[in-house]
């Protein structure tokens, strides 16, 4: 009797200690995902034959079905072999997988209880709304001198141009939405909603004393709360249609995620998600096979082939020193990863940093900073919505305004417009940099604060960007030892797939590094990638609480920081091992393999002067662009050309090599032996360098034959200086330990520093 009940007890313990390292057992459910050729009738036949119930196709994934087995334990740490072994032998069954519970958390904070709401008529920027909280919505309109409002996201400006989200459909993937809320009922869209947890059409949240399931309703109000109904708040896209998917109030499995992400992709335009793997600073997790397929199907087939828009909150693990590159949802090229800034423009305490973040909207900050006002459960409203949970739906609302301005935007067009229009403004970050294409970018905020008016103006005149090319460079499989306190440095000479017209990339969008590393403590690693143009992205920072010995297996790190730069040239991967006192083993790790996947276009997307403002309608009267030269410009002209010919570029896309007769000679990359300075000019490297980076001629990235690169200095030498030793494998001079004046390896001294004596160790 005790033995029979043991799995149930263990399951209960696992559920109680889910986020604890005490329990790492998988929790298997009595639900299966099955791929069956032959249509729904064949799926029903196989399900009935083996005692299952076919609950239907998994979202929009063709030939994938949801099977349920009532006689299998609901949750177990034991894999159920018998239940599906016979199904897997069916000739029509191509794949079967028992579903596993995935830990997913909402990216907000403690519950708050709204105070009484008083209605008043308020005027702001010539926009009139009688909604009770309108005057306090600081992130939409700057009309409060008491709080020194510094910058809004120009949402009122987009409204004044006539855009309010009409005919755009946004769905909140969360714990349900209160569809009968007075601020949501007018815009509620039944076709954009579903209860995946309950397997029915009604996404109403489950009510309890703590209002645990308030999250989705709060997110929905930010997007599409009705305006001028005298109730509570105003959504950013207050005429958009709003739906909700209840999928977080129960076991979250790969199948649950796939169903949610692929719900009615021809009807829903934008999916907004404010959740993800634990932001605990030790988890590395992302979408599994079905969810990955849902993302890919969505961007390829959704919105009549223009691609579903997936908006994702970047994560709240700042206090746990988490890094959002370890979250495979926000780290995906298919999602628009949204960061948060406080009203003051300072970094919120919960913010995670990573190179995959695309843009930023407002949320809460310190205790004295105002939070976000939105709809709440039980037909109320709140002024305490927080975290990156609040930022993602805000971004979804702004994107809805842009889609109303131009419904033909593709999923990549939306990202291009965000990159072009986001602005650093008053956002405070220590790492703002300008990449080689001229974009300001930060690991905290991506390309900056979203600007709704600038986005709709770009959308009005936009021409679709050229097709996406994917260049998969050959993997570097040379195994390198990762020594404690040292940097492993690997240089990859990318071609950008120049030999394949279907994959050739000259203008970068996303860059992915796929990497396999073994290591005794994963949290001690930090990883940087430097582009051929010299832009450095931090792919991973040290994570204090990540004690895992699993390393990374084909994990994909993504950066947006090279957007607009060239693909071909030397890409430099640097892995630094900073052993912490928490490390139980001092053994080195190994870089086993890494490869580059370069996403972008084979031509510059804004090559032609006449394409700079592009529209479905005629140019607006305030059009700030003139047509000095109407012919085709040279592809290396960034902002077009002004005659008398195509080489008369206004500015260069990448670099210029020299001037002649007042003409900029624009080139896609600086030749070998040259580097770019801070004015995008090609200058000669030091004679010692084969190639160089940065803004000085002696910042070598590789050395000429017979010379060695000195660690930490980016300079080349014919022999290693005192305090360094030569590593022939990497042709680099590495630092000795601080007590050594000369050494043959990091810890083997041949001569000690002055005042120290050597000790022979046998």
Image (cartoon, helix red, strand yellow):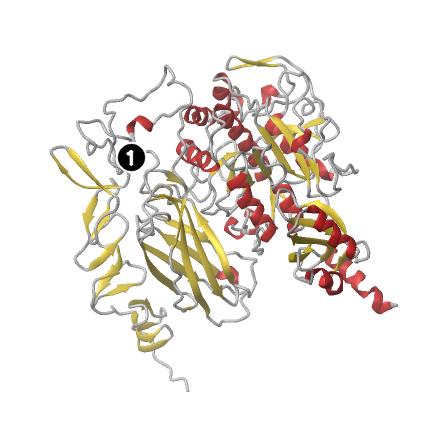
537 w.r.t. 25: above or below: above
If the image is split into quadrants, where does the C terminus sit?
Answer: bottom left
Query: Which x, y percent locates residue 237?
Result: 57, 25
Task: Farthest residue to the right: give it.
Answer: 1
Judging depth in this view, the residue of 732 and 56 nearest the camera is: 56
Query: Which x, y percent locates residue 554?
Result: 49, 59
Counting other residues with Cα less than 10 Å from the Cα at mark 1, is it few (<14), some (14-19), or many (20 or more)? many
328 w.r.t. 402: above or below: below
Residue 507 shown left or right of residue 307 in the figure: left
Residue 331 shown left or right of residue 3 in the figure: left
Q: Answer with the quarter of the image where residue 607 lies.
A: top left
Task: Farthest residue to the bottom: give it.
Answer: 762
Query: Which x, y percent locates residue 330?
Result: 53, 45
If the image is split into quadrants, where does the N terminus sit?
Answer: bottom right
Judging depth in this view, the residue of 45 and 379 nearest the camera is: 45
Residue at (35, 71) in percent of width and height: 739
Q: Name the residue beneath numbered marker 1.
A: 638
């Amino acid at each position: 009797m005790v033995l029979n009940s043991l799995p149930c007890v263990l399951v209960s313990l696992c559920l109680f200690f889910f986020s604890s390292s005490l329990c790492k057992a998988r929790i298997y459910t009595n639900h299966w995902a099955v791929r069956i050729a032959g249509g729904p009738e064949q799926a029903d036949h196989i399900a009935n034959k083996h005692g299952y119930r076919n609950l239907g196709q998994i979202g929009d994934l063709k030939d994938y079905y949801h099977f349920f087995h009532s006689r299998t334990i609901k949750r177990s740490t034991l894999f159920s072999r018998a239940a599906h072994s016979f199904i897997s032998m069916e000739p029509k069954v191509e794949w079967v997988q028992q579903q596993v519970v995935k830990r997913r958390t909402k990216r907000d904070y403690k519950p708050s209880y709204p105070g009484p709401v008083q209605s008043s008529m308020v005027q702001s920027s010539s926009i009139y709304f009688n909604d009770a909280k309108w005057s306090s919505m600081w992130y939409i309109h700057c009309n409060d001198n008491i709080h020194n409002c510094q910058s809004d996201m120009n949402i009122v400006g987009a409204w004044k141009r006539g855009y309010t989200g009409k005919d755009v459909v946004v769905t909140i993937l969360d714990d349900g939405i209160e569809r009968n809320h007075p601020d949501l009922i007018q815009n509620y869209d039944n076709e954009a909603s579903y209860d995946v947890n309950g397997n029915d059409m009604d996404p109403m949240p489950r009510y309890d004393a703590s209002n645990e399931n308030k999250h989705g309703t709060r997110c929905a109000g930010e997007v599409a709360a009705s305006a001028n109904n005298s109730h509570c708040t105003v959504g950013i896209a207050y005429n958009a249609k709003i739906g909700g998917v209840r999928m977080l109030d129960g076991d979250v499995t790969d199948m649950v995620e796939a169903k949610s992400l692929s719900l009615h992709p021809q009807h829903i335009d934008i999916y907004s998600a404010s959740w993800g793997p634990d932001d605990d600073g030790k988890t590395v997790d992302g979408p599994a096979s079905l969810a990955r397929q849902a993302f890919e199907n969505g961007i390829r087939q959704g919105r009549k082939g223009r691609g579903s828009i997936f908006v994702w909150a970047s994560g709240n693990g700042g206090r746990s020193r988490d890094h959002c590159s370890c979250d495979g949802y926000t780290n995906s090229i298919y999602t628009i990863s949204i960061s948060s800034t406080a009203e003051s423009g300072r970094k919120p305490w919960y913010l995670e940093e990573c190179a995959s973040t695309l843009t930023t909207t407002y949320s809460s900050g310190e205790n004295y900073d105002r939070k976000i006002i939105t709809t709440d459960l039980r037909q109320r409203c709140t002024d305490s919505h927080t975290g990156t949970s609040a930022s993602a739906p805000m971004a979804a609302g702004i994107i809805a305004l842009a889609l109303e301005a131009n419904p033909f935007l593709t999923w990549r067009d939306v990202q291009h417009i965000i990159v072009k229009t986001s602005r650093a403004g008053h956002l405070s970050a220590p790492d703002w940099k300008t990449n080689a294409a001229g974009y300001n970018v930060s690991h905290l905020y991506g390309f900056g604060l979203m600007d709704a008016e600038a986005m709709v103006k770009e959308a009005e005149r936009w021409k679709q960007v050229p097709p996406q090319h994917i260049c998969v460079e050959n993997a570097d499989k040379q195994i390198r030892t990762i020594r404690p306190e040292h940097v492993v440095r690997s240089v990859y000479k990318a071609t950008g797939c120049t030999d394949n017209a279907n994959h050739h990339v000259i203008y970068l969008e996303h860059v992915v590094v796929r990497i396999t590393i073994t290591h005794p403590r994963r949290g001690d690693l930090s990883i940087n990638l430097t582009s051929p143009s010299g832009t450095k992205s931090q792919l991973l920072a040290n994570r204090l609480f990540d004690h895992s010995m699993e390393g990374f297996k084909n994990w994909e790190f993504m950066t947006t920081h090279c957007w607009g730069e060239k693909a071909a040239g030397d890409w430099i991967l640097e892995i630094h091992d900073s052993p912490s006192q928490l490390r139980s083993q001092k053994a080195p790790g190994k870089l086993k393999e890494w490869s580059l996947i370069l996403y972008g276009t084979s031509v510059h997307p804004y090559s032609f002067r006449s394409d700079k403002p592009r529209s479905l309608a005629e140019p607006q009267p305030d059009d700030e662009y003139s047509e000095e030269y109407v012919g085709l410009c040279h592809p290396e002209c960034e902002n077009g050309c002004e005659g008398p010919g195509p080489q008369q570029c206004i500015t260069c896309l990448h670099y210029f090599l020299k001037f002649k007769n007042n003409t900029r000679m624009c080139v896609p990359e600086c030749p070998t032996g040259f580097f770019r300075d801070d004015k995008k000019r090609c200058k000669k490297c030091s004679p010692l360098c084969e190639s160089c980076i940065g803004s000085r001629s002696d910042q070598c990235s590789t050395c000429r034959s017979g010379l060695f690169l000195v660690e930490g200095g980016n300079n080349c030498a014919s022999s290693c200086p005192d305090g360094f030793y030569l590593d022939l494998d990497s042709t680099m001079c590495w630092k000795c330990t601080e007590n050594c004046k000369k050494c043959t390896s990091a810890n083997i001294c041949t001569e000690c520093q002055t005042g120290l004596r050597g000790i022979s160790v046998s």
